[in-house]
């Protein structure tokens, strides 16, 4: 049975159609967290976030408190919010910016206070036209309300937030690439280590880059205390998380669930959540955390929805997006489409990623559409091994950023789990699913 | 003589003033240039170069990296149909093929009347309402061929212009004013704080 009794931390206002307005926000506890934060010292606010053990919700799952503590002390530093949500099958930040923009603005202001940063940027993917308008409207209202600008709520803390539209590039979700885009350049990831954004970031100044969902948790954490947040979940995976469920399920959608307390089976099959697979067809496989993650078969359905739990099985919870394949899904077609995505979105800096993704896509295309050869199966693995040597998890990196090392996940998973299907595609000279 | 119309020129200058460095306004200004002309014209990019303190070549080189910037004319409505994994499983490829028939243009092309450009997009982050369709980056949530046809008919009749402005217009909500916090004032405060701290430390050391 699914465990559904945890408080709603970031999707509290989902039931209201006017959840994006300041009126609704104030009527539902809005900006109380910020008022409380401003009555504390910045160090005390940071300590609460540390106590909450809030893991970054962008995909890598790095503890937010630790990221903050690494910020190099300097006269000028920046806070940048990553809202470039583009990992296929991920749609939680889309909800948060469109439906609860004030929660984001309050979270960013709390973070900026804790970090003593006076200018923050919210980078949103350009395809979120409504989200961009809603966040701009929220910023305008927050300034007017005294929750932003000079001497916030009469304190001596001041902050400006600028919303920055992206322009269509998956790679800009990578934090150094996002910084480049924010500096007005092509979104090419920067080489790191040694210098991470916390040391040398935007304009060469120390910069914290945090995800939209991570920020949206802060009002609740400050209001209720880090300990209350840490009491939810199990082990390192604390609090709740927005899980985005899509693919072949009866009730695709976004569900805020307490960390670790539910399993993938609960998420996919519980009537209150995914509601099972249409036509009661069998589950073939599922992706546990965005298309960069290796796939799982039905035998992993009882795995808990937690960061370390999924990592222990050589995949990742990533962006919390689960894609369901039913028995009618063609594994070759699914892996081909994911590879096509990486091939289109490779920024082109590093040879293994730029050349490898296109080559893999062409091989997958001919297997799916006709012209595939038996030796292509070994060639696929050889190419994947060139991009991420050893094909282990977490993957070895031959490229500046992890886009490259994410490419082999789907092909390697599909080939390992459904080799017979690949061979049938060769024999059939194309897709066997009609 | 500005190529941007006065209102856009003013917004462009206000946007530049929001950033510590002018070049940071590159992407927002390129969106404004598309709002001006529907796509990126040479004149628009030259003006962005002037405003951001870069060269027209740098502007074009940057713009070409990003999918949303069009260096060739596009239709008044850019229709994007997603075929990435969640949409693939929901019939995104079939819907894209249907859209091509309805609009009378190939994927990547513009209809003869100049009204529509059709694009196959990557994931648009709306995967629970699949296949996902956007028109000018507005989610229209037409997941069936019939719903898509009805939408296209509405657009042809000019019925949804309030909801879906012509291609290029991205953010219709204007920022209410510039930066409120003086960077100079903050820097001065920080310097004073540091001096006071050092003085305290020195005294304690004596």
Image: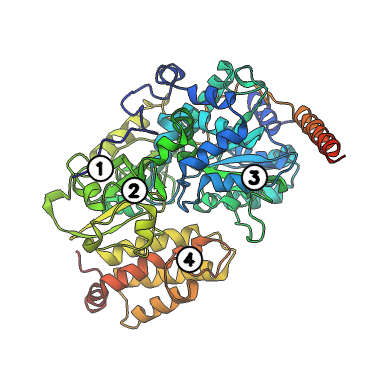
Sooner in the amino-acid sequence: mark 1 or mark 2: 2
Sooner in the amino-acid sequence: mark 3 or mark 4: 3
Who is closer to the viewer here, A37 or A168? Answer: A37
Q: Residue at point 46% right, 27% down?
A: A223
Q: Distance between the residues labelled 4 and 1?
A: 37 Å
Q: How far apart are marks 3 and 4 (CA)?
A: 25 Å
The answer to whether the residues at label 1 and label 2 have Cβ atoms under 8 Å apart is no
Front tag of 4 and 1: 4
Q: How far apart are marks 2 and 3 (CA)?
A: 45 Å
* Secondary structure beneath label 3: strand
Q: Are marks 1 and 2 on the same chain?
A: yes
Which chain letter goes with mark 2?
Answer: B
> Residue extending furthest front?
B206
Few, some or many residues within 10 Å of mark 1 (<14, 14–19, 20+) = some
Give the residue pinned by disc 4: A405
Few, some or many residues within 10 Å of mark 4 (<14, 14–19, 20+) = many
Q: Are marks 1 and 3 on the same chain?
A: no
- Colour mode? rainbow
Label placed on residue A279: none
Give the residue pinned by disc 3: A207
Camera sees residue A123: yes
* Secondary structure beneath label 2: helix
Which chain letter goes with mark 4?
Answer: A
Give the residue pinned by disc 1: B145
Q: In this view, does A212 lie to the left or right of B193?
A: left
Q: How far apart are marks 1 and 2 (CA)?
A: 11 Å
What is the tally of numbered marks visible in this picture? 4
Give the residue pinned by disc 2: B100
Residue A123 location in percent, x, y? 55, 40
Residue B132 location in percent, x, y? 34, 43
């Amino acid at each position: 049975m699914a465990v559904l009794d945890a408080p709603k931390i970031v999707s509290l206002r989902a039931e209201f159609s006017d959840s994006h307005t300041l009126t609704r926000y104030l009527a539902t506890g809005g900006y109380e967290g910020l008022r409380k934060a401003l009555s504390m010292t910045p160090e005390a606010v940071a300590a609460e976030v540390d106590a909450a053990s809030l893991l970054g919700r962008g995909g890598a799952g790095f503890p937010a408190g630790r990221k903050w503590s690494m910020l190099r002390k300097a006269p000028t530093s920046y806070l940048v919010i990553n809202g470039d949500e583009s990992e296929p099958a991920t749609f939680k930040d889309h909800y948060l910016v469109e439906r609860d923009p004030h929660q984001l603005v309050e979270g960013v202001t709390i973070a900026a206070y804790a970090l003593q940063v006076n200018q923050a940027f919210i980078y949103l993917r350009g395809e979120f036209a409504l989200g961009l308008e809603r966040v701009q409207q929220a910023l305008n209202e927050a300034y007017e309300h005294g929750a932003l600008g000079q001497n916030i709520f009469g304190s001596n803390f001041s902050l400006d937030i600028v919303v920055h539209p992206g322009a269509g590039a998956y790679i800009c979700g990578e934090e150094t690439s996002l910084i480049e885009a924010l500096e007005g350049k092509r979104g090419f990831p920067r080489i790191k280590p040694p210098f991470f954004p916390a040391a040398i970031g935007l304009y060469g100044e120390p910069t914290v880059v945090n995800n939209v969902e991570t920020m949206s948790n802060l009002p609740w954490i400050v209001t209720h205390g880090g300990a209350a947040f840490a009491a939810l979940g199990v082990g390192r995976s604390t609090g709740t998380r927005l899980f985005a469920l899509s693919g072949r399920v009866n009730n695709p959608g976004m569900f805020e669930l307490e960390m670790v307390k539910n399993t993938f089976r609960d998420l996919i099959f519980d009537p209150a959540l995914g509601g099972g697979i249409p036509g009661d067809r069998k589950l073939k496989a599922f992706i546990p955390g965005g298309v960069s993650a290796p796939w799982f078969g039905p035998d992993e359905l009882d795995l808990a929805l937690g960061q370390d739990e999924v990592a222990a099985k050589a995949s990742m919870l990533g962006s919390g997006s689960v894609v369901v394949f039913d028995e009618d899904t063609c594994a070759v077609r699914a892996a081909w489409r994911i590879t096509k995505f990486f091939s289109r979105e490779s920024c082109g800096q590093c040879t293994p990623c730029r050349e490898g993704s296109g080559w893999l896509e062409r091989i997958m295309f001919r297997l799916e559409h006709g012209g595939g050869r038996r030796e292509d199966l070994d060639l696929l693995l050889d190419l994947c091994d060139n991009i991420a040597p050893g094909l282990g998890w977490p993957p070895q990196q031959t490229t500046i950023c992890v886009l490259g090392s994410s490419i082999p996940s789907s092909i390697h998973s599909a080939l390992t789990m459904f080799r017979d299907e690949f061979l049938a595609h060769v024999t059939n000279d194309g897709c066997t699913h009609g | 003589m500005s190529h941007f119309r006065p209102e856009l020129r003013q917004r462009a200058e206000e946007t530049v003033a929001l950033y510590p460095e002018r070049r940071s306004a590159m992407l927002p200004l390129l969106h404004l240039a598309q709002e001006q002309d529907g796509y990126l014209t040479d004149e628009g990019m030259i003006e962005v170069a002037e405003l951001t303190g870069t060269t027209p070549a740098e502007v074009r080189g940057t713009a070409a990296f990003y999918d949303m910037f069009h260096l060739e004319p596009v239709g008044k409505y850019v229709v994007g149909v997603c075929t990435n994994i969640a949409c693939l499983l929901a019939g995104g490829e079939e819907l894209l093929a249907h859209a091509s028939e309805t609009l009378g243009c190939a994927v990547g092309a513009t209809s003869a009347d100049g009204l529509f450009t059709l694009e196959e997009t990557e994931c648009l982050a709306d995967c629970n309402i699949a296949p996902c369709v956007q028109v000018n980056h507005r989610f229209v949530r037409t997941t069936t061929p019939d719903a898509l046809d009805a939408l296209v008919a509405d657009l042809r009749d000019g019925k949804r212009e309030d909801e879906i402005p012509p291609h290029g217009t991205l953010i219709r909500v204007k920022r209410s004013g510039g930066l409120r916090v003086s960077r100079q004032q903050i820097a001065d405060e920080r310097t004073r704080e540091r001096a006071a701290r050092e003085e305290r430390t020195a005294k304690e050391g004596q």
